[in-house]
Image (cartoon, rainbow, N blue to C red):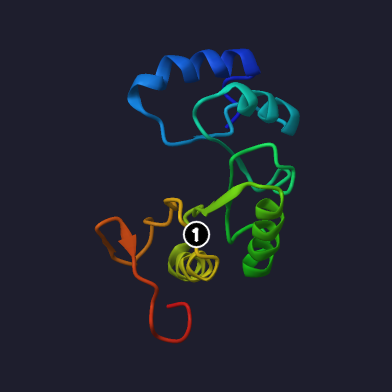
Amino acid sequence: NGAWETPEYALANLRALEPVGLELCEEPVHGVEALRSVRAQATVPIAMDETHAPGSGAVDAVCLKITRGGITGVLRDAKAARAAGSDIYLASTYDGPRGIAAAVHVAAALRVTRPCGLATGNLPVRDGVIDVPRTPGLV
């Protein structure tokens, strides 16, 4: 999350890591314009946290979290990100069982295709997939 400080340093590191086949790099630098610059030259998809500008189109993907605005906020940010040409995925900030369940439901409703960071709770993971709970509520 911004540890590479400059687009040039981020690009040098991404190029050095190319042999390992990175799937995604989330926020190698801070700021929308710096992210846009890295994305323009990187071969690895670049992502940003939703706290910045999910509708900026500066990145390939936006990481959304239930803790930032709840379900309504995620739906709003997902719409803005997709309208700007960015993909979306959800992750947890160790939200607890209800937060994780809510995020799983939202990811399913949004038909998220990227891997999500939601395997931090009590829902079982089978073959890399968390089944959407079939009972009412977020337990």
Residue farthest to the bottom, as pictured: 136
Q: Nearer the viewer, residue 22 or 125?
A: 22
Decide: is 82 above or below 75. Answer: above
Q: Position of residue 35 (x, y in %)?
A: 66, 29
Q: Residue at x 57, y 19 (%)?
A: 10
Q: Nearer the viewer, residue 60 or 93?
A: 60
Q: Residue at x 42, y 51 (%)?
A: 115
Q: Secondary structure at mark 1?
A: loop
Q: Position of residue 20 (x, y in %)?
A: 34, 24
Residue farthest to the left, as pictured: 127
Give the side of residue 19 with respect to residue 32, left or right: left
Decide: is 26 above or below 114. Answer: above
Q: Position of residue 135 (x, y in %)?
A: 40, 85
Q: Position of residue 5 (x, y in %)?
A: 63, 19
Give the side of residue 104 with respect to residue 119, left or right: right
User: How many numbered discs, if any?
Assistant: 1
* Residue beneath disc 1: 112
